[in-house]
Image (spheres, helix red, strand yellow):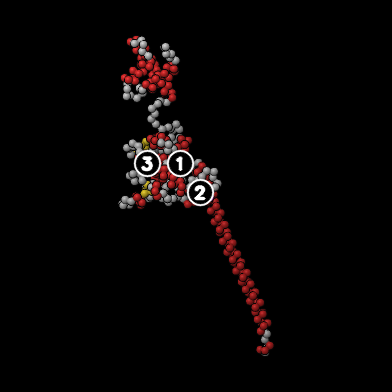
Amino acid sequence: MDVEQIDVAKISEVFAKKKHQEILAEIEYEKSELEKTLSRIDNSWRERLNNETRDFEICLRSTIKKIKRPVFSKLFYWLAYDTWDVFSGLAILNNIEPRSLCFDENGNIYKNEDARNRKEKTKKRFVRASNYRADSIPHLRTLDDFRLSSRTLDTVFHEISNILTQFPRNTNIYQTRLLHSYYVTLDIWRSGNHTEDRYPVKYFIDWAIKKRIIPEWLDWAKENGLIDDDNKPEIEDREPARKSRTSFQNVMAALFNELLESKKKENPKITKTELICELAHNYSGYTGFSKSFLKQNITQGQQNLGYVEEK
């Protein structure tokens, strides 16, 4: 073949077409592989999304249930005791599981076990009102076993904050409130005359109610029979209860009437008022013998007994 007769342009065109077809085929193959890869990635992410959504829904239902109707399961353990030590008792009154904390001899709460074991004395080892933080005590638990440090729960609280009708128990805020309540309760306790290391369980409950520190678990404990439903603080009251007061006035009036009749045998002109003044004078300094107290209760007792005073 004559070299002069070779059509370079035509040969180049044929080569270009063939090469173009090869490139297109390679592109189609790469495209197919890419679509398969994207499909696998999409399926993987969809599966992960479904799993996380399912876990979130489970956690959400559990959280809502705990918020609306907490079950203070740890109380079965603590209310089986006859007595509590002071710091455990005050923690329990504030819905804190004492076994999740470390106390020093003054009731301060250590940040962790390592802080308690340190030999140096420094306030940085403790969690006090001045240094509350969300991560102050990551191991803090409540009596209803509500794990306050869970990130999952933090996420749940954030997501459902606009769903629940009542403000949810945000872990950071709630932990701070629990710690603050504990230290306030501790300060109130120290203001009283409590000299023992341990006290009966009922003593703590009565004291708390008297101080208007109502435990979150009180109604639940009553409903489940853990404490008496009629549990009321044994608060000293100078005045008897209404029924007892009536009985007291009746007895007081009857004795006074007998005394008055006896006195009239010696002094027929003696009056009720004069005898009351005499009693108040003779028993001056004793509780219950003021003129006003005697007159009020004797008069009421005489009315109860239907006594008619002679003119």
First reached walking from the N terminus: tag 2 or tag 3 = 2
Tag nearer the camera, 2 or 1? 2
Tag nearer the camera, 3 or 1? 3
Location of residue 277 by image quarter: top left
Q: What residue is drawn where x is 67% and y is 80%?
A: 13
Residue situated in front as seen by the camera: 34 or 138 = 138
Q: Position of residue 108 (x, y in %)?
A: 36, 46
Circles 2, 3 touching at the beta carbon (< 8 Å)? no
Position of 156 with respect to 289 (left or right) is right
Q: Looking at the magenta stretch, what is its main secondary structure?
A: helix
Q: Amino acid at mark 3?
A: Asp
Q: What residue is drawn where x is 43% and y is 19%?
A: 300
Give the CA separation, mark 2 to mark 3.
32 Å
Q: Which residue is mark 3?
A: 187
Q: Quadrant of the C terminus?
A: top left
Q: Is residue 194 visible?
A: yes
Residue situated in front as seen by the camera: 191 or 294 = 294
Q: Which residue is mark 2?
A: 157
Give the CA separation, mark 3 to mark 1.
25 Å
Residue 159 sits inside the magenta stretch: yes
Q: Amino acid at mark 1?
A: Phe
| Mark 1 neighbour density, 10 Å: few (under 14) some (14–19) many (20 or more) | some
Report the magenta residues as a range. 155-161
Q: What residue is drawn where x is 52% and y is 43%?
A: 166
- Name the mark on residue 72: 1
Q: Position of residue 54 (x, y in %)?
A: 54, 51
Q: Position of residue 294 (x, y in %)?
A: 38, 20
Q: Amino acid at mark 2?
A: Phe
Residue situated in front as seen by the camera: 125 or 7 = 125
First reached walking from the N terminus: tag 2 or tag 1 = 1
Q: What residue is drawn where x is 38% and y is 39%?
A: 188
